[in-house]
Amino acid sequence: MSTHPRHRLDEVVHAPVRFSIMATLAAADKAEFSFVRDTVEVSDSVLSRQVSTLEAAGYVKVTKG
């Protein structure tokens, strides 16, 4: 059994696009969808899917309106 710390990493957060989203949001209380999309350099659909995964895991909260 390996004890290396990498085995404790949460794969939800450490996928490259989701990691970039989390890094973008780290210093923010809120961020506009378009700001995150442009900063992470992904399409609307990619960002939407990845944010949904993060929201389901409890890492972000999405509000619309």
Image (cartoon, rainbow, N blue to C red):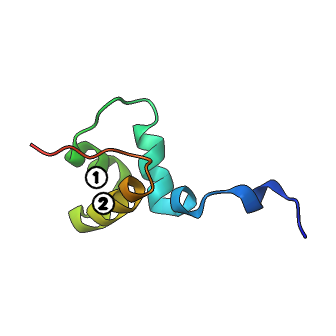
- Residue sitting at x 44%, y 29%: 27
Kindly indicate whether the residue at mark 2 contacts the one at mark 1 (C-beta within 8 angstroms). Answer: yes
- Residue sitting at x 29%, y 33%: 30
29 and 36: which one is in front?
29
Residue 40: % across, % down: 37, 52
In the depicted structure, whether residue 49 falls above or below residue 35: below
Residue topped by disc 2: 47
Q: Kindly state the secondary structure of the residue where label 2 is placed.
A: helix
From the image, state whether disc 1 or disc 2 is nearer to you: 2
In the depicted structure, whether residue 1 falls above or below residue 42: below
The residues bearing labels 1 and 2 have C-alpha atoms spaced at a distance of 6 Å
| Residue 42 shows up from this direction | no
Q: Amino acid at mark 1?
A: Arg
**Count of marks, rendered view:** 2
Judged left or right of residue 42, residue 9 is right
Which circle marks residue 37 in the picture? 1
- Residue sitting at x 46%, y 36%: 26
Judged left or right of residue 38, residue 26 is right
| Residue 16 shows up from this direction | yes
Residue 64: % across, % down: 14, 46
- Residue sitting at x 38%, y 45%: 60
Residue furthest left in the image:
65
Judged left or right of residue 48, residue 6 is right
Q: Amino acid at mark 2?
A: Leu
- If the image is split into quadrants, where does the C terminus sit? top left
Q: Kindly state the secondary structure of the residue where label 1 is placed.
A: helix
Which circle marks residue 4 in the picture? none
Instruction: Indicate the quadrant where residue 47 lies.
Output: bottom left
Of the two numbered discs 1 and 2 on the same chain, state the one appearing first in sequence. Answer: 1
